Amino acid sequence: MNFWNTGYKPCIAEMPALNVIVERYKGKNVTFLSIAPEEEEIIRTFLKKRSFHFIPVANARKLIIEDFITEQMYPYTMIIDKNGIIKKIILGGSEDKEKTFSSILPHIDESLAK
């Protein structure tokens, strides 16, 4: 689950690395959600110009601010296992997010196999 904002450069910069992760897990029982505060039309327009393979969830300002993060924390990524347990929280953006995930991907692979 990735919390992001269309106007925040670190969120945009990490999208290619996040897309690589989505492709790696294609066909496996994994869901990638992108939670954004903007209206659906803003997200749709943005995604026409940029590729982001996560499933977009728009209009989530209340959820984001009240339940998870403040807007100053974008991007914010949570790895949640099949039982709903948060396994890892990664604060901040990175163009090399794939490397950031490398230490936890083997664990995710193991849990998918079970």
Image (spheres, rainbow, N blue to C red):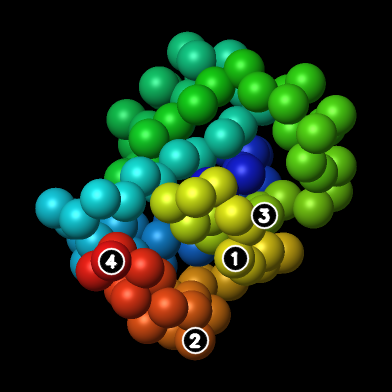
Q: Earlier in the sequence, mark 3 or mark 2?
A: 3
Q: Residues within 10 Å of mark 3 (few under 14, many from 20)?
A: many
Tell me the kind of residue under disc 3. Answer: Tyr
Among the 4 quarters of the image, the one containing residue 10: bottom right
Q: Element at badge 1?
A: strand
Residue occupied by mark 3:
76
Label 1–label 3 contact, CB within 8 A: no
Residue 98, how many percent across, how many down? 42, 76
The residue depicted at 67 percent of the width and 54 percent of the height is 76
Q: Element at badge 4?
A: loop
Depth-wise, is mark 3 or mark 2 nearer the camera? 2
Residue occupied by mark 2:
103
Tell me the kind of residue under disc 1. Answer: Lys
Residue 64, which numbered label? none
Q: Alpha-carbon distance for marks 2 and 1?
A: 12 Å
Depth-wise, is mark 1 or mark 3 nearer the camera? 1
Tell me the kind of residue under disc 4. Answer: Lys
Residue occupied by mark 1:
87
Q: Element at badge 2?
A: loop
Q: Alpha-carbon distance for marks 1 and 3?
A: 14 Å
